């Protein structure tokens, strides 16, 4: 395991459960079933990227083969992305549930990769009972969630409900300590910024005091930028934005050549890796966009904190990256002269796009540090 990876890796019992579904859906066993599913993984990949519908997404979970393909290939990635969002909120910012009975709403849950990850994480906190309420319009997805939930978080109470993520009237009653919307905003068909802000406002009314709201979207520009605009619009409102940015200033990348998203290390499960052998996706890291909100009193970040918003580059004599700080972009350079090739490579591998770092405060648009000891990663 890479030292940058989360300590609680993907549960092997979940992978085995999805493999059983794959064998049932294909009528094949072991590797033969996986070979059949590669075409279905490709179909889903196209749907999520180049073939995205202009309106409402189809219920791809209704097809047993597509459901199994999703479970083996995309479910683990949703699990990992949610884990990194939780690490930002809990490990970096110190969020914790305010009530002993924790209610989680997984909005547009699908088969539960995001919501079950939240439930498992919170189940590890002593003195709390966990209730996960999953809302989705697909009965097939909810049935799959119910079947794998005992393997993901056996101590949690699981409730599923057919509903529409756009319509608050179809959600369960009451408020929630955590609301997770994983890859749902882009599937709602909300075209205008005002529509998305209205949805977010309704969402916030169902968040309990000191609750946590996490929105995760794909890293595509077409999905990441709407989330970033929504995040900027809500930054100073209740609940306030607590991540991944270090402040409430508007994103300086909007409208530019590049767009804001996270890159995190990841070792895929064996079966995910097997499916990818002929698909040739880059699974060395996971990419996503996120926005995290809470009105709880959390750990303050130091004034030296900044966020890396572009891929760091190791070039001759320099380690270079771009940060966002105070609503502005700054280029940071760390000299590598005097370092061995191994030391320079280790420095490069230590930092990724999306990292929260600490470095000397400066107003310069281009800042050269004295050496690597002036730079420190704050997050997990």
Image (cartoon, rainbow, N blue to C red):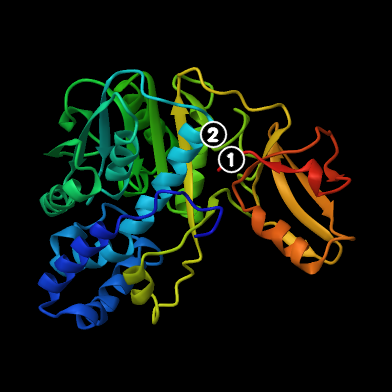
Q: Is residue 11 left or right of residue 137?
A: right
Q: Quadrant of residue 71?
A: bottom left
Separation of residues labelled 2 and 1 (CA atoms): 6 Å
Name the residue at 44% across, 37% down. 193
| CB under 8 Å between discs 2 and 1 | yes
Name the residue at 45% across, 29% down. 293
Name the residue at 77% across, 62% down. 344
Q: Please tell me the numbered disc located at residue 25.
A: none
Name the residue beneath numbered marker 2: 92
Q: Quadrant of residue 248?
A: top right
Name the residue beneath numbered marker 1: 379
Residue 291, image x, y percentages = 47, 37
Residue projecting furthest to the front: 126
Callout 2 environment at 10 Å: few (<14), some (14 to 19), or many (20+)? some
Q: Earlier in the sequence, mark 2 or mark 1?
A: 2
Q: Quadrant of residue 121?
A: top left
Q: Is residue 376 left or right of residue 186?
A: right
């Amino acid at each position: 395991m890479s030292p940058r990876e989360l300590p609680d890796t993907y549960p092997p019992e979940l992978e085995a459960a999805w493999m059983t579904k794959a064998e049932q859906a294909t009528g094949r066993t072991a590797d033969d079933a996986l070979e059949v599913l590669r075409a279905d993984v490709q179909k889903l990949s196209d749907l999520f990227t180049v073939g995205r519908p202009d309106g409402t997404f189809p219920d791809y979970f209704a097809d047993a083969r597509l459901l199994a393909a999703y479970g083996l290939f995309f479910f683990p990635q949703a699990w990992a992305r949610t884990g990194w969002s939780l690490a930002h909120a809990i490990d970096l910012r110190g969020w914790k549930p305010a009530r002993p009975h924790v209610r989680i709403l997984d909005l547009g849950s699908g088969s539960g990769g995001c919501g079950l990850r939240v439930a498992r994480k919170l189940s590890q906190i002593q003195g709390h009972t966990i209730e996960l309420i999953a809302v989705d319009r697909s009965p097939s997805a909810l049935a799959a969630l119910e079947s794998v939930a005992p393997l993901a978080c056996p101590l949690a109470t699981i409730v599923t409900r057919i509903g529409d993520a756009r319509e608050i009237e179809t959600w369960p009653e009451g408020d929630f300590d955590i609301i997770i919307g994983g890859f749902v905003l882009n599937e709602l068909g909300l075209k205008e910024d005002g529509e998305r802000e209205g949805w977010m406002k309704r969402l916030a009314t169902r968040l309990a005091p000191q609750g946590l709201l996490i929105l995760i979207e794909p890293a595509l520009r077409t999905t990441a930028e709407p989330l970033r605009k929504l995040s900027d619009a809500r930054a100073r409102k209740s609940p306030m934005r607590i991540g991944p940015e270090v402040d409430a200033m508007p994103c300086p990348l909007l409208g530019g050549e590049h767009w804001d998203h996270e890159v995190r290390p990841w070792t895929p499960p064996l079966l995910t890796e097997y499916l990818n052998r002929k698909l040739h996706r880059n699974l060395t890291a996971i990419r996503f966009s996120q926005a995290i909100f809470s009105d709880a009193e959390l750990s303050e970040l130091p004034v030296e904190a900044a966020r890396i918003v572009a891929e760091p580059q190791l070039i001759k004599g320099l380690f270079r990256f771009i940060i966002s700080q105070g609503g502005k972009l700054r280029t940071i350079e760390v000299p590598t002269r005097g370092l061995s090739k191994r030391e320079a490579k280790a420095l490069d591998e230590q930092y990724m796009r999306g990292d929260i770092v600490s470095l000397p405060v400066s107003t310069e648009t281009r800042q050269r540090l004295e050496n690597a000891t002036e730079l420190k990663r704050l997050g997990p």
